[in-house]
Amino acid sequence: MTFEELGLCAPLLKALAAEGYVSPTPIQLQAIPFAMAGRDVQGIAQTGTGKTAAFALPILHRLAANPKRVGPGGCRVLVLSPTRELASQIEESFRAYGKFMNLKTTVMFGGVPKGRQARAMQMGVDVLVATPGRLMDHMQDRTVRLDGVEILVLDEADHMLDLGFIVPIRRIVQQIPQQRQTLFFSATMPGEIGGLAGQMLKNPAHVAVTPVATTAERVEQHVIMVETSRKRAVLFDLLMGPAAGRTLVFTRTKHGADRVVKYLEESGLAAAAIHGNKSQGQRERALADFRSGRCRVLIATDIAARGIDVDGVTHVINYDLPNVAESYVHRIGRTARAGATGVAISLCDGEERAFLRGIEKLIRAKVPVMNPPAAPAQKRAA
Ligand code: AMP
């Protein structure tokens, strides 16, 4: 099945060709026909499955089929996203896929001044991508109005719940006409998320790809048992190892991330961190350096890493094991994108063994134990 056969309009096909997409991914094959037909969709899909295009393409197709002017402060499509990184990436995707269409898109998130975001809304836009908190601010300021929304997307609903956005989302949805199309995506669908979906969707089509365990199966996983005090040195040795390529390192805390960067830089290895205490500019620079290969090690916290889209990550290293087993699967999924395989290595100290057991229960497999890499003397001296 090709994008042509899905019936997407010519400007979209041209943009997809320009992006180098040859065929739709499974979630796209499942979701696009329903969404193009105007049905509500409830999708279970993780980042990396092509879920952004699974909702962006049919939305753009529908907008193109029915061009309309938007009033001041208004938007035809509202996409809610939990983090600023994900919001920016979703907006970029809409722009990339819509580049041969005459559409206005904008993105709004916290941590940056509101003025420019308000000005971008003055004439109305076709697609607004927003984090819930900042959108609420703009609604209170009356710089955004939602009474003209035709299509609503909720992305990473489970993550929204983790971040405490459920109440803001309910408030936002109240402002949107009942007569609308709603596309609802989540990596997992626990009871509370299912309940929210039930309230927001009308007779949805259900689509799902890559259950959690399958991602885990594609990644070669290891765990190194190590004392906390030795973790930094072991990480350095792993990063200096012959096989290490583009590596994403996860820490549990922002300070932990900063400490790791400091240690690596003092040891002569360039690394950058992204987390919630970094400014938008710092995060974007770190990501750009990592994408371009100028810096092959990126240290991230779970929240900062969720949704960032970097292809070609060969290794994920869990400097700390996450206390939520699902996060482990999200983390290691960053290396097995678009069918590629990758390596995930976790450093586990005595206190983290319980987390490891939880992870092994979730993925229904034992993570093989490996020895710390042997460190040549000259590297230790570095
Ligand atoms: P997502 O799951 O939306 O974060 O997408 C993961 C990655 O897959 C992104 O880098 C997309 O640009 C890419 N992608 C999405 N759809 C396709 C496709 N049909 N063919 C090739 N790459 C794709």
Image (tube, rainbow, N blue to C red):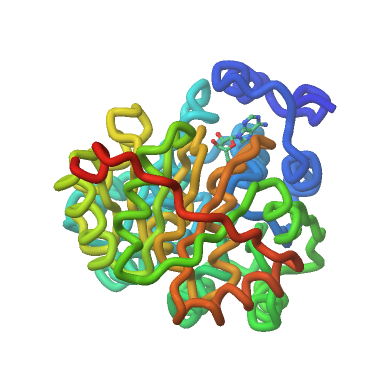
Split into 4 quadrants, where in the image is the C terminus? top left
Quadrant occupied by the N terminus: top right
Seen in the picture, residue 251 relative to 95 is either above or below; the reply is: below
Quadrant field for ligand 1: top right
Question: Where residue 261 sits in the image (x, y, percent)?
Answer: 23, 52
Q: Answer with left or right where residue 54 lies relative to residue 332.
A: right
Q: Name which residue lies at 49% across and 66% down.
A: 225
Which residue is painted at 80% across and 31% down in the image?
Answer: 6
Please report the residue visible at 55 percent of the width from the left and 22 percent of the height from the top.
19
Q: Can see residue 1?
A: yes
Image spot of residue 256 (x, y percent): 27, 66
The reply to whether residue 153 is in sight is: no
User: Residue 28, located in which quarter of the rendered image?
Assistant: top right
**Whole-percent x, y for residue 48 in the image:** 60, 45
Which residue lies most toward the front here? 377
Left or right: 102 as drawn, with respect to 120: right
Depth order, front residue of 325/231: 231
Q: Is residue 243 above or below residue 362?
A: above
Q: Which residue is rendered at x = 81% and y = 60% of the image?
A: 206
